[in-house]
Image (cartoon, rainbow, N blue to C red):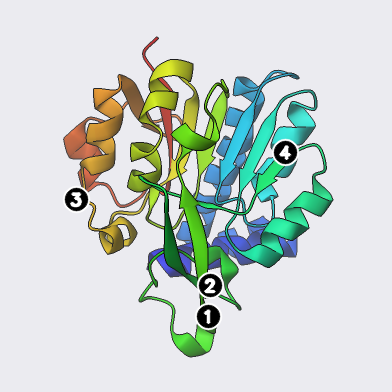
Amino acid sequence: MALVRRAVGAVSRRLGRPELVSAFYAGARQLEHEALALEAVLGASLRSDSGYVDVGCNRGQVLREAVRIAPRGRHFAFEPIPALADELAREFPTVDCRRLALGARSETAQFCHFTRLDGWSGLRKNPDVADEQGAPEYIEVQVSTLDEELAGETPTLIKIDVEGAELGVLEGARSLLMRARPTIVFEHIAETSRLYGAEPGAVWDLLAALDYRIMSVMGDGPFDRTRFTSTSKVVNWLATPDV
């Protein structure tokens, strides 16, 4: 169901008329609202010289807005699919684009690239995507950590969209989060994170231990652990530090 919700949301945005699909499908309406809320978060969080980090950048859909809002900021984009990483480097010459996956530790790993649905690619194969639908190919990628890649950097906002691997990305960013205290926007769907062995409350536990409040990107919350683990209506989340 999560795959269907997100696919319909993507189609509605590509049509340029999201209200047409949203009128018939409540899940698309929710995703449309979350996309608008994400733009609002970017606008509220970033100044013209703020730093932005995009983990799982894909084709730069969110990066493009961040660069527009903060043209003088120091920005980083991480994308492990070679063709997409090269495309990002060409389109965003002022952004430090790195052909890397991110996780809890540095390693070499196998990556499932869905050549027809690259937005659902990841370090684990999503079983909701049939082979005939996604046309998967398996590639070897380098995995690093945000702590290693951004040592000494102080980003204002980090966006994470890694198809269930968000816990590993956050584990590999503990030092950065404690030092820089960035706002975090992350996609989290419980059933997808289970592909990586993550318990339902693991992301909440890690962020709470680092003194972050967790809300929906729409601004609902803050969510306690019970509510975070029990909701199925929120896809995109917002974590803000208790400074």
Of the numbered discs 2 and 1, the one sitting upstream in the chain is 2
The residue to which callout 3 is attached is: 199
The residue to which callout 4 is attached is: 65
Of the numbered discs 3 and 2, the one sitting upstream in the chain is 2
Of the numbered discs 4 and 2, the one sitting upstream in the chain is 4
Give the residue at x 39% y 71%.
126
The residue to which callout 1 is attached is: 137
Q: Which amino acid does label 2 sit on?
A: His
The residue carrying pointer 3 sits among few (fewer than 14), some (14 to 19) or many (20 or more) residues within 10 Å by Cα, namely some
Q: What secondary structure is found at the residue carrying circle 3?
A: loop
Q: How far apart are marks 4 and 2 (CA)?
A: 25 Å
Of the numbered discs 1 and 4, the one sitting upstream in the chain is 4
Q: Distance between the residues labelled 1 and 4?
A: 30 Å
The residue to which callout 2 is attached is: 113
- From what the image shows, is residue 8 above or below residue 100? below
- From what the image shows, is residue 158 above or below residue 106? above
Q: Which of marks 1 and 4 is in front?
A: 1
Of the numbered discs 3 and 4, the one sitting upstream in the chain is 4
